[in-house]
Image (cartoon, rainbow, N blue to C red):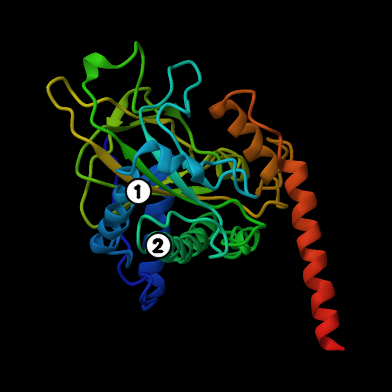
């Protein structure tokens, strides 16, 4: 089995000039991929290979900085617990393995008045621009996914209306897998351990170096190679719950390079999450899964990846979000007077 490739032409970011017949075919192709594999390559999305390469280039400038100049931007030093730098081996997406051989920078906060890496000119602007491009593509895909299930086209989109604000945990993650000799790694160590994603859907943009594999329904891993000009899209765990297991959240991993090959690897991952206050229930009306709050579910999964010492920030964050909303309301009332 291979991961299918679906042509997004006619429904790209630049146009929506698609006939009802072609729209139905597109929905059918996505549904087939998401029920059989959980992954799909989208070509002609409107996000170009040049855009991807520019984000990777400026991200690599950050990762090339000495460690002491990256640490001040670490995840956990911001108001949002998932924004910022993640150092090598800090994360274990498969907790039974040693720490993953990768670094990351998570863009969750978009505002300019927080600390951004000043040593890398244009870093924030490039990350935020790409974040917003991926956001628009995500909303288009969520509509198609609802249509494919013969649901209200906005049933998923309504719970993602706050992407890009402090009320939604959607994250652009730029990843760097440094050069490594496989024989020098710890026993059982991978570049990225076996895991499934946490939220609704994920977009992945890769560099040519391989290593990404997806667990098929037959129980065998299949390669998810680099295909220039495409966006690799997969279902995440909350969406599987939401659709009562109609759509599959497939386990995936990134292997070490083969012996004799120590090449670095890069990728961009756009993790789409429902709004923090969204209550995820089975969209078919069943009770196959109990209702779950989006941000509480996310924080519990973070504890698994970063160790049980990961702070439970969900309640604190809710209180902070409520305080911000109340402050904005008071400001509006004052302006109205």
Residue 160 image position (x, y, % from top left): 61, 59
Whole-angstrom CA distance, mark 1 to mark 2, is: 16 Å
For label 1, the SS is: helix
Residue 63 at x, y = what percent?
Answer: 34, 43
Please rate how many residues cluster around mark 2, counting C-alpha atoms within 10 Å: few if below 14, some from 14 to 19, many from 20: some
Residue for point 24% across, 60% down: 49
Residue at 21% in and 49% down: 227
The answer to the question of whether label 1 and label 2 lie on touching residues, with beta carbons closer than 8 A, is no
Q: Earlier in the sequence, mark 1 or mark 2?
A: 1
Q: Residue furthest top?
A: 187
Residue on which disc 1 sits = 62
Q: Residue furthest right?
A: 337
Question: In x, y percent, where is residue 192?
Answer: 38, 29
226 left or right of 272 in image = left
Res 38 seen here: no
- Residue found at x 48% / y 15%: 96
335 vs 137: above or below = below
Front disc: 1 or 2 = 1
Task: Determine whether, in the image, residue 168 is placed left or right of residue 133.
Answer: right
Task: Please say if 52 is above or below 21.
Answer: above
- For the view shown, which residue lies furthest in the front direction? 68
* Residue density around tag 1, few if under 14, some if 14–19, many if 20 or more, within 10 Å: many
Q: Hey, which residue is sitting farthest bottom in the picture?
A: 337
The quarter in which the C terminus is drawn is bottom right
Q: Nearer the viewer, residue 44 or 71?
A: 71
Where is 45 relative to 181, above or below? Answer: below
How many marks on residues?
2
Q: Which mark is residue 130?
A: 2
* Nearest to the observer: residue 191 or residue 5: 191
Label 2 secondary element: helix
Most foreground residue, 214 or 34: 214
State the image quarter where residue 34 is shown.
top left
């Amino acid at each position: 089995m291979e991961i299918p490739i679906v042509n997004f032409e006619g429904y790209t970011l630049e146009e929506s000039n698609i006939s009802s017949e072609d729209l139905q075919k597109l929905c059918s192709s996505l549904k087939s991929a998401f029920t059989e594999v959980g992954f799909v390559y989208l070509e002609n999305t409107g996000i170009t290979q040049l855009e991807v390469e520019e984000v990777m280039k400026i991200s690599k400038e950050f990762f090339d900085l000495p460690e002491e100049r990256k640490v001040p931007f670490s995840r956990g030093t911001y108001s949002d617990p998932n924004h910022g730098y993640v150092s090598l081996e800090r994360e274990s997406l498969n907790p039974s393995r040693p720490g993953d051989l990768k670094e990351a920078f998570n863009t969750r906060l978009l505002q300019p008045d927080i600390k951004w890496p000043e040593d890398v000119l244009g870093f924030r602007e490039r990350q935020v621009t790409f974040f917003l491009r991926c956001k628009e593509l995500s909303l288009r895909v969520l509509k198609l996914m609802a249509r494919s299930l013969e649901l209200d086209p906005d049933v998923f989109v309504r719970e993602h209306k706050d992407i890009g604000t402090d009320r939604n945990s959607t994250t652009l993650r730029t990843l760097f897998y440094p050069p490594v000799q496989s024989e020098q790694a710890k026993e059982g160590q991978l570049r990225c351990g076996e895991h499934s994603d946490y939220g609704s859907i994920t977009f992945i943009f890769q560099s040519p170096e391989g290593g990404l594999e997806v667990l098929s329904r037959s129980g065998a891993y299949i390669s998810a190679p680099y295909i220039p000009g495409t966006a690799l899209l997969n279902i995440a765990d909350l969406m599987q719950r939401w659709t009562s297991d109609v759509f599959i959240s497939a386990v995936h991993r990134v292997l070490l390079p083969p012996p004799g090959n120590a090449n670095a690897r890069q990728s961009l991952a756009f993790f789409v999450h429902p709004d923090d206050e969204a209550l995820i229930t089975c969209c078919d009306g069943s009770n196959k899964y109990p209702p779950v709050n989006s941000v509480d579910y996310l924080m519990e999964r973070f504890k698994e990846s970063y160790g049980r010492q990961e702070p439970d920030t969900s309640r604190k964050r809710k209180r902070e979000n409520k305080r911000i909303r109340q402050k904005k309301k008071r400001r509006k009332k004052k302006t109205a007077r």
